[in-house]
Amino acid sequence: MKPVTVEHFGIQRKIVSNMTSQSWQEIPHAGPVIEFDVTDLMAQFNTLRESGKLKNKLSINTLMLKAIAIALKESPKMNAHLEFNRHLVKGTLKCFDEVHFSIPMQLPNGEMMTINCHNFENKTLDEMTEYMMDVTRRLKNTNLTEAMFEVSMDNTITALKKGKIKTVLCRLLGAKLGKYRVKTLSGKAKKEYLSIPEKDRITKKDIEQGTITVSNLGSVDRGRHGHCAILEIIPPQTSVIALYAATDKPVVVVNDKGEKEIAIRTILPMTILFDHRACEYSDLLGFINKIQDICDHPEQIMEW
């Protein structure tokens, strides 16, 4: 067969392919899909947006990130990094108070870049909104290849320090030689790009590993019924959360008379996958119960 097109992977696809391959080779994934009834939460969300309390326009994505950041305090093993040596059968789990969200974001050219959103554990809704607005601003000044190549080289140096000589040689050969080489800026173009202040573009710090990944698939595929069945956990993280679009569905509810009836409710599917080496399903219950509490008592978001 004659292919219609032949596309050699750029650095973005190389990094994604490498990390996802490592994820599925090493990590035993497990976890549920929870359907949260967010009918009352959405009503309170609209009330908050119209209240004049916030300086910036609030998105449902930012609201859910805030809810997740709060809920993670109840399940610290979800917000953690795992170091595990299968050959020596030893492991270390490092749980964090800080919440650094790794969030896949779609760029104007259609490519994806995962941004590390730092210190969301105590940010207000306005602060989170302003952070995301600033990321969007800096992305416009960013050369994706340059930013990701910086991260790739840093990871290569780390591998070298750990004595992974074969890995380092293979990466360098793949990045710099032949038709698969990564074409980075050079000369005047490189100098001009580096002259952009780091506060105005995405740097290595913005792409390095966070403490947990949250992917809002609903923002890409709005209005469709369904949920995310599988998503990779990126090592050394122990968890990944996927949100799908909130949609209206018929649900069995109990009315004021204590009788069951069918009602139209707004349902938000949340997929929570965890590394079974690091934790059990029971370790997620604190997180799940807190998200449920926020859905059941949405008036609390007025103080966020």
Image (cartoon, rainbow, N blue to C red):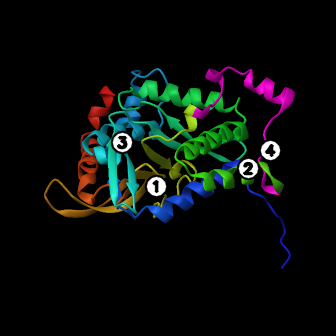
Measure the C-alpha gap from mark 1 to mark 3.
Answer: 17 Å
The three-letter amino acid code for the residue at tag 2 is Ala
Q: Nearer the viewer, mark 1 or mark 4?
A: 4
- Which structural element holds mark 3? helix
Residue located at (62% from left, 31% from top):
203
Q: Is residue 232 left or right of residue 152?
A: left
* Sequence-first tag of 2 and 1: 2
Whether residue 202 appears in magenta in the rendering, the answer is yes
Q: Residue at x 38, y 26 (%)?
A: 124
Q: Which mark is residue 175?
A: 2
Disc 4 marks a residue whose amino acid type is: Lys
Q: State whether residue 141 is above or below residue 207.
A: above
From the viewer's side, name the closer residue of 89 and 102: 89
SS assignment at label 1: loop
Residue 254 is inside the magenta segment = no
Of circles 2 and 1, the one toward us is 2
Q: Which mark is residue 233?
A: 1
Q: Earlier in the sequence, mark 3 or mark 2?
A: 3
Quarter the C terminus occupies: top left
Task: Say whether disc 1 or disc 3 marks the residue closer to the N-terminus.
Answer: 3
Mark 3 against mark 2, which lies toward the viewer?
2
Q: Quadrant of the N terminus?
A: bottom right
Image: magenta residue range = 179-204
